[in-house]
Amino acid sequence: DVQIQRGVDPKDTFILESEIGRGKFGTVYRCTEKSTGLSLAAKFIGCPKKEDRRNVEREIEIMKQLQHPRLIQIYDAFENGKVMTVILELIEGGELFERVIDDDFILTEKSCTIFMRQICEGVDFIHKQRILHLDMKPENILCLTKTGNRIKIIDFGLARKFDPDKKLQVLFGTPEFVAPEIVNFDEIGYGTDMWSVGVICYVLLSGLSPFMGHTDVETMANVTIAKYDFDDEAFEEISENAKDFIKKLLIKDMNCRLSAQQCLEHQWLKRKTVLRTPSMDVTKDNLKQFVDRWNEPYVFEICPLGARSNSSESLLGDSPSPCGSLASSLGSMDGSSDSGLLGPPREP
Ligand code: ATP
């Protein structure tokens, strides 16, 4: 059982090596445990404020509850002055999308089902532990190895324990992947993660981002009305089963979306289903552009929107990034008004 070691320098126990990743909150290094020689990953998170420390403690608590092969595993944790360090299992295969755009990787619908099935297995386990991930996006899906097909879900920094009897609202996420109820600051639930799973699946199959507008505001406006289509040529070779899978996730009403378990029972993810296997060349070209765009130095800000209810447990105070300018410029969005905010999706 991992307990946070307070006042202990992780460098006493681990040898730090090269940097292997960087997020909004943490920097991740490869490291070796001195006593065992084990290779691991050390995520350092600067915590100048007590609130930051509380957030990391929550992330650690949640990870401790999530012991599953599809989910990143925690190994140790330290609090040393204003820096917290989480020691994680090392995942060496890099981001899933980087992997699938590799020239050596033959991307087919079949391979997409192999990845989507594992993502759903991971999310199913998370949800069965009554936890919401709330940051499901391609960056947070890593490949275990450079050549195998196994993936793991990482980054529980925004995850929350969920009590279906209590109303929960949050104000964070990444515009392209967040569900309408987040944009609208409505009640969230298990379906909130399932929407993001639907977006990930759409991108994986086409290389296109279903709700992307010219600006974050446009993107979120498209999300709130669940406006997307399969018109692009990238979908020409994609099976009806696959489209049906996405259609049953990208539904505005979160209660009508498939659960992770139902996804695993969907025809498209059944192992027996025979799929055409043309390599998806248009998708691959699109995915290369998608990944390039995500690797640009500017990444979308987390944007709280439409904070108009205060009658429930809100996590406003936990919002990791102080923004709100978009919210005020948008006002109430119900998609019915001709706000001029809606633009053609998918064009960067
Ligand atoms: P975000 O900005 O997405 O909230 P964060 O600051 O919480 O990120 P992580 O997403 O946990 O940080 O990690 C940042 C990056 O480091 C990841 O995108 C990934 O590439 C890499 N990374 C994280 N954990 C591991 C690990 N266990 N093994 C290998 N690489 C990792």
Image (cartoon, grey):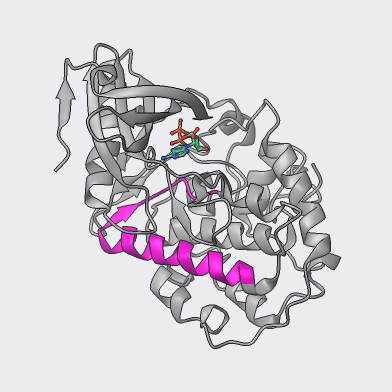
Residue shown at 62%/46% (left/top)?
A: 176
In percent of width and height, residue 42 lies at 37, 29
Question: In the drawing, does residue 125 fall left or right of residue 199?
Answer: left
Count every numbered label the image shows and give the total. Answer: 0
Q: Nearer the viewer, residue 87 or 171?
A: 87
Q: Is residue 57 magenta?
A: no
Check the picture and name the quadrant holding the N terminus.
Answer: top left
Q: Which of 179 and 200 is in front in this view?
A: 200
Question: What segment carries the magenta color?
Answer: 111-137
Q: Is residue 330 above or below residue 342?
A: above
Tell me, yes or no, if residue 233 can be seen here: yes
Q: In this view, does 67 lie above or below 110?
A: above
Residue shown at 65%/47% (left/top)?
A: 98
Check the picture and name the quadrant holding the C terminus.
Answer: top right
Question: In the drawing, does residue 312 fall left or right of residue 329?
Answer: left
In percent of width and height, residue 52 lies at 32, 22
Residue shown at 23%/25% (left/top)?
A: 78
Tell me, yes or no, if residue 342 can be seen here: no
Q: Is residue 174 above or below residue 128?
A: above
Residue shown at 63%/31% (left/top)?
A: 299
In percent of width and height, residue 31 lies at 38, 29
Q: Nearer the viewer, residue 321 or 115?
A: 115
State the image quarter where residue 147 is shown: bottom right
In percent of width and height, residue 126 lies at 33, 58
Question: In the drawing, does residue 262 fall left or right of residue 130?
Answer: right
Q: Does the magenta stretch include residue 119?
A: yes
